[in-house]
Image: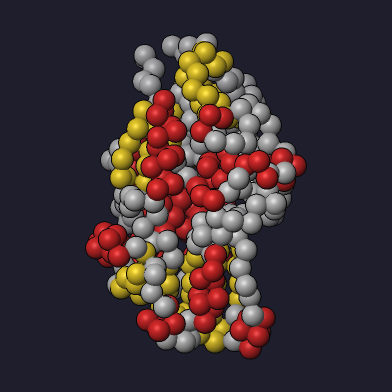
Amino acid sequence: MIPKTMAAVLLTGHGDFDRLDYRTDVPVPQPKTGEVLIRVAASAVNNTDINTRIGWYSKKIEVAPGAADSAQVDTADASWSGVPLQFPRIQGADACGHIVAVGPGGDAGRIGERVLVRNMLRSYVDWRPYECWTYGSEIDGGFAQFTVAPAREVYAVPCDWSDAELASIPCAWSTAENMLHRAGVGAERVLVTGASGGVGSAAVQLAKRRGAEVIALCAAEKAAEVRALGADRTIDRGQDLVAALGQGSVDVVIDMVGGPGFGALLDVLRLGGRYAVAGAIAGPICELDLRTLYLKDLALFGCTFQEDAVFANLIRYIEAGEIRPVVSKTYPLSQIAQAQADFMSKKHTGKLVLIPPQVAE
């Protein structure tokens, strides 16, 4: 039986943890035509949830997320899309759960499927290129007991993984796969920054799956864990990258870090090398020597929009047993503030996952 109300975390505005309001009286959403209702089993923590909460996407913020001051945020451009966020909002870019209802005219045969929601949704923008709604930003997401999503973008995933493992996939792994897809990574030398994080650890595994030699940039104390994921070599993030690797020694850079180390990443790329970026956890403002860019014939890829093949590929990799996420810790949904604080401390490897209260069958 589907209850009338549910537990959920409402984001009430841009700001600190006090903007996260855990409630148990939130109305259960109703699926519209073309949508399904999902009972959420798990939802992982991601950079984008925190960045959206603190308003880091506002161009007025020029520092790393951990140093951002929400008082400086321009609410007019503090979301992925550049359109003001609508509050209250249920965040959560990831959702693993079971379909429990379908919208009018929907396929009732899907009820009971264990599913993942594609986090970069195209249904709501008529599948136009380079446009998407972000699950948990432009619409309500997975930090709740129930959620709705477009049926066409909800994927059944037959596998023996735990709910927490599956919930680790949508945002982080699609971000990593998208960078590799856009940069056309194959059996070549790839440098992955932030390699112990959710996206970085995914990129290590996904690049190895493509036959790449993977060099991983991470904290020294996490090097053994990152090598266990498949990295051929690790480099301490405090090292001089050019001294460690040499000029022009890498084919592709997969970057989630940005910040002051950006210039060195281009220095280690070979002539005709490719750089793909989908984050800036060390800061969004970088210094670029245009001579490096054009004299080395480099290609730079900014990666947000995802072609349909990206998420479909991930589902295929799961079903074939070719990848496996690392879940560092799980938390009750009510402990979201602690989970996000732990996430921001960057002391873990892999993913932190939130588990909502179980709903009686």
Residue appearing at x 49%, y 22% in the figure: 22
Q: Taking the image as drawn, is residue 60 in sight? A: yes
Could you say where residue 72 lies in the image, as x and y percent from the top left? Answer: 68, 45
Could you say where residue 130 lies in the image, as x and y percent from the top left? Answer: 68, 55
Could you say where residue 166 lies in the image, as x and y percent from the top left? Answer: 37, 41
320 or 200, nearer to the observer: 200
Q: Is residue 100 above or below residue 177?
A: above
Q: Taking the image as drawn, is residue 152 in sight? A: no
Q: Quadrant of the C terminus?
A: top left
Classify residue 298 as left or right of residue 164.
right
218 or 239, nearer to the observer: 239
Residue appearing at x 50%, y 75% in the figure: 265
Residue appearing at x 42%, y 61% in the figure: 194
Residue appearing at x 40%, y 29% in the figure: 335
72 or 192, nearer to the observer: 72
Q: Is residue 2 above or below residue 88?
A: above
Q: Coloring scheme of the render?
A: secondary structure
Classify residue 50 as left or right of residue 290.
left
Classify residue 70 as left or right of residue 109.
right
Label count reads 0
347 or 168, nearer to the observer: 347
Q: Is residue 292 above or below residue 222?
A: below
Could you say where residue 45 lies in the image, as x and y percent from the top left? Answer: 44, 41
Which image quarter: residue 213? bottom left
Which image quarter: residue 230? bottom left
Q: Quadrant of the N terminus?
A: top left
Which image quarter: residue 123? top right
